[in-house]
Image: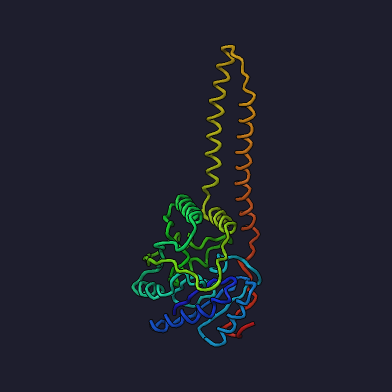
Amino acid sequence: MLSVVLPSYNEEKMIPIATERLGKILTDAGIDYELLFIDDGSRDGTWREILCCSASDPHVVGVHFSRNFGKESAMFAGLEQAKGDCVVVIDCDLQHPPEKIVEMYRLWEQGYEVVEGIKEDRGEETALHKFASNSFYDLISRATGMDMASSSDFKLLDRKVVDTLNALPERNVFFRALSFWVGFKKAEVRYRVQERTEGVSKWSTKSLVKYAITNIASFSSAPLHVVTVIGVLMLIVAVVFGVISLVQKIMGIAQPGFTTVILLLLIIGSFLMISLGIIGYYIARIYDEIKGRPRYIISSICGREGGGK
């Protein structure tokens, strides 16, 4: 059986559309399936629509969070709830073309354990958004040593891959990078990002920046190495200015460099504060991991034993 995980946040208009479209595609392809809608604490009627779909369609399973925990938590909740022999993660807005799921499934039948959805283009985006996205993926690729420039959350995972990801103990997770990091036999399916038919994007510039910082910190220690590099650079600058000052002192040349001293103090102070901020952020992540709180809290489940709540 194929499990299709659909993280959903304020997607009440897309729930019935996704149910009908995915159901038709998978039924026509002769694939046994279940649709897992993970309601990430939506504020609209998303859960109500999931309940309606699960009541009329036995393939639909709904998971309702007690509050908004974020897309990463929603995806991992779907992986933990999935019963299928393989699992596909796809956005509920269907900007990931659902027709590609059949192609992914056929590759899985051939023995591939991870089938990556690779973007051929990013659809309609502003130049600033594209630049920010490209910069983020370039940075995370360099930090992790893996080429993630065109990767996405749209992918198929074999049951053994899903079990491996579910066994990882960390609380702060980056699904896209972790599913790449675990390895296994990989294949690729290329797709073009589709336009939304209903609703609007839930990603603001602020949320994207927060998402980038969180995921870089959760998967890479590269920013901590930046602190070391800054320290080395400042040491070199200090040595150079120290030698210049010493030579001037020996030669009896006046040293009127008050402005230079102030600028150096400001620069060094700024670097120190930035470095402390980076270190402090990592300490905060360690603190979050030590507390051991769950990634999410499930309020109710519908479409399986016991029905909806």
Q: Quadrant of residue 71?
A: bottom right
| Residue at the image position 64 percent from the left and 36 percent from the top | 269
Q: What quarter of the picture does the N terminus occupy?
A: bottom left
| Residue at the image position 62 percent from the left and 30 percent from the top | 263
| Residue at the image position 41 percent from the left and 61 percent from the top | 121
Q: Quadrant of residue 52?
A: bottom right
Q: 105 or 133, which lies in front?
A: 133
- Tally the marks: 0
Along the horizontal axis of the image, is 290 left or right of 1? right
Counting from the top left corner in percent of width and height, residue 126 is at 49, 57
| Residue at the image position 58 percent from the left and 20 percent from the top | 245
Along the horizontal axis of the image, is 264 left or right of 1? right
Counting from the top left corner in percent of width and height, residue 298 is at 63, 73
Q: 307 or 251, which lies in front?
A: 251
> Residue extending furthest left?
110
> Residue extending furthest bottom?
56
Counting from the top left corner in percent of width and height, residue 246 is at 57, 18
Q: Is residue 181 something one can see in this rendering?
A: yes
Q: 30 or 28, which lies in front?
A: 28
Instruction: Judge whether 238 appears above or below 95 on screen.
Output: above
Instruction: Judge whether 183 appears above or below 23 on screen.
Output: above
| Snapshot colouring | rainbow
Q: Is residue 162 something one can see in this rendering?
A: no
